[in-house]
Amino acid sequence: MSGFSADWLALREPYDRAARSTVVLDAVKSAFADRSSLSMVDLACGTGSTLRALTKHLPVRQQWRLADNDLGLLLRAGQTSIPGVKVTTVPIDLARDLEAALDGPIEIVTTSALLDLVSPAWLERFVFETAARKLPVYAALSYDGRISLDPSDPLDAKIIAAVNKHQRTDKGFGPALGPAAVAEAIGHFERLGYSVVQATSDWVFGPDDRNVQLEIVAGWASAARDIGDLSLGDIANWLVRRREIIAAGRSSIRVGHVDFFALPPDMR
Ligand SMILES: C[S@@+](CC[C@H](N)C(=O)[O-])C[C@H]1O[C@@H](n2cnc3c(N)ncnc32)[C@H](O)[C@@H]1O
């Protein structure tokens, strides 16, 4: 499965949903509690995971603009049907046309699993453009660099180091911030007077979550291969050992994420 394939997004969605911070979701909910309707844009929507996770926390009437540059994912996202919720899809390259995605009658910006893909310059532009429109921002599931595996393996630390190095490679927005993105985003918003509620939203995979763990370790092995700091033999042997432990139902993995909700100064 590729990084953004519909199959991978479907596999991870229930774990994403369980991981999303209820503290941050409650902050979003209470910010709009007195509203009867709300218009939002979800940046890099994939198949609409954030829409599905957020609708029940928001006013009954909702207008969602879903933005992504993958037409196949957008097609699926546009098929999401929830009573009271109007969905429009916008094919757009956010690296180039972020501003166009934010223009118009938008009252909150949402995104998930995007910020760790972007460059420092794009992140600064994103914060500036949302602040210039006085928009609140809900950003979920940014990877923060923490990974723990149980049982541990002597090569884990080197594989994790390679994964985190790979996180910083270009994902279409310039060299990515990877694990540094979420702290940097929060810092930018706070310097502009936003109040930010943040909390961890780690993926927690238990011994029975075999399929998702198998995908994750395969993805990490492939990232380590791309980076080239470890020998192919070492990476392959690590993957074999990990797969055996997962198949035996003895593996647990935690992957660190952070969610935040940033509220502009005059909405506090
Ligand atoms: C990790 S997925 C997250 C999808 C969704 N937000 C979720 O949580 O399931 C990253 C998304 O970013 C989108 N994406 C990547 N680069 C993009 C770009 N330059 N413009 C618009 N979308 C982009 C991908 O198509 C994919 O849907």
Image (cartoon, rainbow, N blue to C red):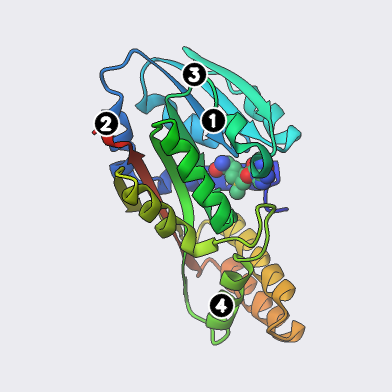
Please state which amino acid type lies under the numbered disc 2: Asp
Marks 3 and 4: CB-CB under 8 Å? no
Res 66 → quadrant: top right
- Cα separation between marks 2 and 1: 19 Å
Q: Which residue is mark 2?
A: 266
Query: Mark number for residue 102?
Result: 1
What amino acid is at disc 4? Ala
Q: Secondary structure at mark 1?
A: helix
The residue under the point 70% across, 75% down is 227
Q: Is residue 202 above or below residue 70?
A: below
Quadrant of the image occupied by residue 182: bottom left
159 w.r.t. 32: above or below: below
Measured from the top left, where is residue 16 in percent x and y?
A: 48, 46
Quadrant position of the C terminus in the picture: top left
- Depth check: give the residue in front, 139 or 94: 94
**Looking at the image, can residue 84 be seen?**
yes
